[in-house]
Amino acid sequence: MFASNKGSPPHRGASRLRPCEIPMIASPERCIVCGSRPRALFRRGDLSVVRCPACGLEWLSPFPEEAAAGTMYGESYLRRWGIDGPEALARVRAMKESSYRSFLREIQRHRAGGRLLDVGCALGFLLGVAREEGFDPYGMDLNPSAIEIARREFGDRAQAGPLGPATFPGLRFDVITLIDVLEHAPDPGALLDLLRERLAPGGVIAAVLPNAASLTRRILGRRWPHYACEHLWYWSPANLRRFLQDRGWIVRALRTGIRKTYTARYLHAYSACLGGWLPPGLGILGNMRLRIPTGEMMAVVTPVSSPLAAGDSLGR
Ligand SMILES: [Zn+2]
């Protein structure tokens, strides 16, 4: 459950048009923020989205089983990035590194360096940027195919999941990044609890995730690209803040209007398989890079109580 698509790749062809022809399992019957019973919001294909009438949290109901179990994050999931050779790999890498650099600069306002764990690191692109920015980077991902590639550059510092005691045993981290991860976790509170134990004293967790109150969501409605079978949860800034605070986190920053870097070619492919909501001529611009708002937000949090007491024996 802790794999990342690292930036909503273009989903191609029939798999996108019929996104969820996979078994379903029950999702929570009550809102995980406030406990209210949800109401149906809309259906799209096999996706059914519900919304809490009290706090506005949205989630898939039921959950696609493979997304909830984390078993969908294999080689085929990686292919959705459109990486079909070294040239495409370099292109996608440059594009994603640009976004990650801006995220890390934001994180540096809270922790300027130290040991960093990227949960859902995919091919390890963020690790490379983190190293350039002065962090000591580690990464894990549920996707063994992705980790195989990441290990070529980062060796043992890239590890296949799931996240647990065997993930870099004995190490604690000054920064843990969850870029496009929290919305994939069937139990996001439990994931944060697990990570809390791995934070060094004064450490922060930085999460980038879809913002269901964003302008892009309001404009695109149910065609919002973040509505996808692997995204189980859709928070707004308000209910995310409440969720985090209720679970013992101090929200040090909650920034909306996150921008990511895309090539025009990538956006064109993305748009085409979602029904063409961007201008059809966009692909002509090829590898021109555009920084666009993606309807996402970034939260930087730190635990209310320092993990120092529980972790003296852990490697720092
Ligand atoms: Zn609620």
Image: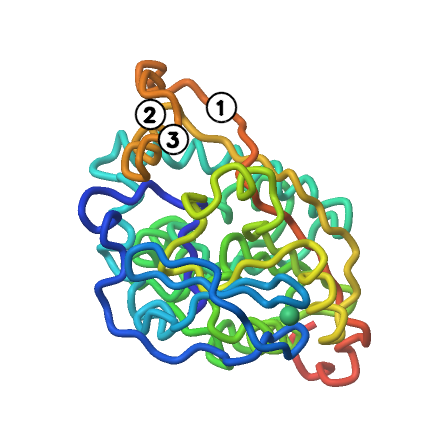
Disc ID at residue 265: 2
Q: Residue 165 or 62: which is nearer the viewer?
A: 62
Horizontal and vertical percent position of residue 287: 36, 20
The quarter of the rendering in which ligand 1 is drawn is bottom right
Give the alpha-carbon distance from disc 1 to disc 2, as whole Å. 10 Å
Which of these two is toward me, 93 or 253? 253
Q: How many marks?
A: 3
In terms of depth relative to the viewer, which is nearer, 139 or 209? 209
Q: Residues within 10 Å of mark 3 (few under 14, many from 20)?
A: some
Question: Residue at point 32% right, 40% down?
Answer: 10
Circle nearer the N terminus (1, 2): 2
In the image, which disc is placed on residue 290?
A: 1
**SS class of the residue under badge 1?**
strand
- Say if mark 3 contacts mark 2, CB within 8 Å: no
Report helix, strand or loop for mark 2. Answer: helix
- Residue pointed to by mark 3: 277
- Residue 247 in percent (x, y) is at 71, 76
Q: Amino acid at mark 2?
A: Arg
Residue type, mark 3 in image: Trp
Q: Is residue 104 visible?
A: yes
Question: Relative to 280, does residue 47 appear above or below in the rendering?
Answer: below
Relative placement, left or right, of 252 versus 19 is right
